[in-house]
Amino acid sequence: MLERYFVSFLLLVSGFLLFISFKLPLYTTSGLIGAGFFPRIISAILLILVCYYFIALIRKKSEKQEEGVPKSIVNQMSGGQEVFRKDIVIKQCILIISLIACIALTDVIGMLPIIGVFMFVMLTVVQRFPWVKSLIFTVTILFIMYAIFELWLGLILPKGMFE
Amino acid sequence: MLSELLDGFMTVMSSPNAMIWCVAGVTMGTLIGALPGLGPITGIALLLPLTFQMDQLSALILLMSIYLGTMYGGRISSILINVPGDGGAIVTTFDGHPLARKGKAGYALTLSAISSFIGGLVGFLGMVFLTSILAELALIFGPTEYFSLILFTLIAACGLTQKRPLKPIIATLLGLLISAIATDPITGTQRLTFGIVELWDGINIAVVGIGLFGISETLIRLEEKISNKKGEKLTFSSLFPKVSEVLSNFGAMIRGSIIGFVIGVLPGTGALLATFMSYSTEKKLSKTPEKFGTGVPQGLSGPEAANNASVGGALIPTFALGIPGSAATAVLLGGLMMVGLQPGPLLFENSSDVVWASFAGFFIANILLLILNTAFVPAFAILIQKAEPFLVPIIAAFCFIGVYMINHRLFDIGIMIVFGILGYFMRKANFPLAPFFFAFILGSMLEQNLREALLTSTGDLSVFFTRPISLFFIIISIMILLMPILRKLKLKR
């Protein structure tokens, strides 16, 4: 099932990029290859191949169902690891949302403090470590990062309100 | 030539300053190279200010030691946490990390250190003996030859020879398409940038690489049970490969070294192309190509040797012609000029003693790196075992800072997250990441060389078939393209 969703996504992306590439000139005024040549050719070939693969996937699934193979097994046979656990998906979403939140808050409270908060949240909420252990680990890593990036390499990281 | 080299060794050995900076360079280089996002380019650029007050020899040795050290260091994070330190270490993740996951982290680190040493040695020998010949050959390569070479490399790497090549081909095409996102280098037209200013210069290779491999790795790791990996005891003998195992990889190391050296000497190519070419060569030569990507030693030793051999290769045009062989040597070139050296044919006439001493320093750095990278194997392997439960936030945090430091832009971190999610879904749907990333890197080079070649030939396509080197690569490419069809015909019979 996941593979079909992903291939459908690829179908949409390649179709959309092919559409966009038609707005770019295929050749220059002097008759040489223009800006649109490469994206148009590549997206067109990609679209054809993805379409072919998508049809092959559907055929494969219907053949298996006709043969009486249970639906859940068919899903697994169509490729990819199909087993999705809700708790894992939630953890992955927390990771991605936390990273996005870090981007938004870096200029406000500084990069190292926000990374500290991120690590603490990941360790306590996502990986269920005791908060004391998480805090010690977070502080240690933050100190190492500060020593490497700011003291040793002399890099200037955003400091936000601590500037 | 040999007497000049021996004089060079004497100069370095009798100069405590040069030796100290050699040790400092390899140590700092290894540490910087091991950090995700920090490769030789950043490493040399960051430490360049150190050379301002130094004599020419110490400065040159420091810069070359950092360069070589970052190449060694890049493989550490690739093997241990699946996050390449730089472009040249990406291929190391393909089989190096699976070996680490099988509990053979120490073995993988030592094998890659030995391969790196062999590669560095071949690079050194080539640098000493073949400088003038290979520099001349590199000059012959124009856009036509580069286009054919890149096309051949892409076709060879996209898995056409596999039983089910459709997924790698789709991944390759997707990578090529994403590489087109940027301002058109010839006409200046905005392509697929959707009005976003940050995309005008294209998407940074390191940003895509870190997202694709690093962030997707954290998402995959969240699915695994941490407790399974606790309690595995590392024995001292498991940390080092047996002599027979090293010997069985010797062929791959030599092949990788030669590929790395030859590719490295071509201006503008660098370690990345060398490692991918070595990997595809090993895969083709293997009796079990389908096992590549699951922890095959030859998939690690060949590219690692190529990676370090490319350093020696890339230094040849830098010294002899003043043309950088890679992006890292371009920064190094700037460093040479800052300390008063003028790279080019006159360098050997005006500063012959410094150049030959720096070649000797390069050899000493290589030996120091082998010692450093084998002696610390237990430390690295134990470190990864202890740090395993904490790796998800550590990888994510280092990716976050590493990507930010490339351009000092938060926008890049957003792009990294996007590619992390894409990489995760590609992995889950069994689409290979390597052909995608390879095509992404080579896409712009492929297009630019195609257009430049056609520009110089006023649109005449026959230019690719009339130049012998180009024709050679085109013929091999066609042969690879025909292989699946020939295989089908053979099966029908």
Image (cartoon, coloured by chain):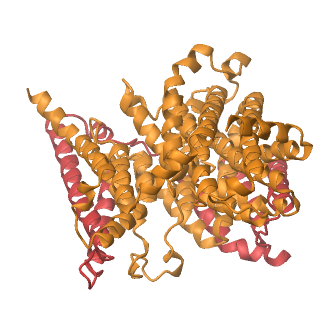
Chain colours: A red, B orange
For this orientation, the residue located farthest to the bottom is A29
In the figure, A73 relative to B166: above or below? above
Q: Quadrant of residue B113?
A: top right
The answer to whether residue B386 shows anywhere in this view is no
Image coords of residue B51 (percent x, y): 82, 59
Measuring 50% from the left and 75% from the top, which residue is drawn there?
B199
Is residue A83 shown left or right of residue B166?
Answer: right
Q: Position of residue B421 (x, y in %)?
A: 49, 57
Frontmost residue, B273 versus B231: B273
What's the residue at 75%, 77% (across, down)?
A108
Please tell me in which quadrant of the rendered image residue B368 appears: top right
Left or right: B81, with B153 as reference point: right
Q: Is residue B218 left or right of residue B357?
A: left
Q: Is residue A82 above or below residue B177?
A: above
Task: Give the image location of residue B46, x and y in percent.
Answer: 75, 61
Residue drawn at point x = 56 percent, y = 68 percent = B414
x and y percent of residue B243 in the render?
62, 15
Q: Which residue appears at 33% of the width and 54% of the height?
A: B148
Quarter of the figure that contains the C terminus of chain B: top left
